[in-house]
Image (cartoon, rainbow, N blue to C red):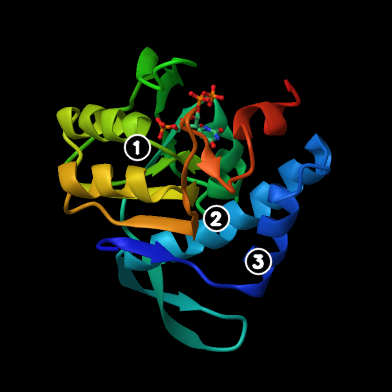
Amino acid sequence: MKNVTVVAHPLINNSMTLLRDKRTQADEFRRHSDIVSKLLLIEATKGLQTETSKIETPIASFSGQLLTDRVVVVPILRAGISMLSAAYGLLPSISVGFIGLVRDEKTAIADKYYEKLPDIKSADTIFIVDPMLATGGSMDEALNIVKSAGAKRIVVVSIVCAPEGLERVNKKHSNVPIITAAVDEKLDSNAYIVPGLGDFGDRYFGTE
Ligand code: PRP
Ligand code: URA
C-alpha cells in the first residue's frame, strides 16, 4: 500500500508473536512492545538530516555527522505513551506533545479529551506514535491537529495497522509515511483489528 513501510526483522517477528499471544502478561507485553517500538523508530528516523562535525578522537581528527533536525514526538494517549521510552532512548533531546483521544466503544469514533503540543515549526520532524491504527479515526484526527499546529514533515509510527485504517489515512494525508510492524487482515464488527492483539492500552497498562 502507498506510503506504508512494513519493517521486517526477526526480532520484530519474535516480539510480535509474543505481543499477539493472549497468554502474555503485562510485564512481558511491555518489554516486547518496547523492542518493536525501537526497531520501528529506527526505520522511521532514516530520513533525519545530519551535518558534518569535526571532532577529535583520542587518536586523531575525525569528520563525523551529527543530527540537526528538531524532532517532536507526539504519542496519542493513552496507548501511545508505550512508545515514548523507545523514542527517548534513541533521541534523548526530543520535544514531546500529547494528544488524548478515546474511541467510543459503540461507534469507534475518536473523541479528543486532551491536547498539549510544543511550538511546532515547519522544518521540525514530527513522529506521531500510536501502537494501533484500526479505523484510522484517531490517527486522522491527530494528523489534522498537528497540521493545524504548523507541522509539515510528519511520520506515523504504529505497531499494528488494519487495511481499512491505512486506506483512510492514505486518502486524507497522502504525503504522510506510515511505518509499521504489521498490516493485519481486517477489522471485526467492534472495529478491533483481526488477528490483532486485543486492546493494546489495557494489556500494556494492566487494566484488562
Ligand atoms: C486505541 C489505540 C488508538 C485507537 C485506534 O485507543 O491506541 O488510539 O484505539 O483505533 P482507531 O484507528 O479506530 O481510531 P483507545 O481509544 O482504545 O484508547 P486508549 O489508548 O486510552 O486505550
Ligand atoms: N485499539 C486497540 O487497542 N486494539 C484494536 O484492535 C483496535 C483499537
Q: Is label 2 in a helix, a strand or a loop?
A: helix
**Is the CB atom of the residue marked by disc 2 within 8 angstroms of ligand 1's nearest atom?**
no
Measuring from the top left, give residue 89's x and y in whole percent: 60, 51
Q: Quadrant of residue 67?
A: bottom left
Residue at 41% across / 57% down in the picture? 179
Query: What's under tag 2, amino acid-wise?
Result: Leu
In the picture of the structure, the residue carrying the numbered disc 2 is 90
Residue at 56% across / 42% down in the picture? 83
Relative to the observer, which residue lies in front, 69 or 165? 165
**Is the CB atom of the residue marked by disc 3 within 8 angstroms of ligand 2's nearest atom?**
no
Q: Is label 1 in a helix, a strand or a loop?
A: loop
Please say if 187 is above or below 61.
above
Picture quarter with the N terminus: bottom left
In the picture of the structure, the residue carrying the numbered disc 1 is 136
In the picture of the structure, the residue carrying the numbered disc 3 is 13
C-alpha distance separating marks 1 and 3: 24 Å
Please say if 196 is above or below 112.
below
Q: Earlier in the sequence, mark 2 or mark 1?
A: 2
**Is the CB atom of the residue marked by disc 1 within 8 angstroms of ligand 1's nearest atom?**
yes
Picture quarter with the C terminus: top right
Measuring from the top left, give residue 109's x and y in whole percent: 36, 20
The reply to whether the C-beta atoms of the residues labelled 1 and 3 are less than 8 Å apart is no
Of tags 3 and 2, the one toward the viewer is: 3
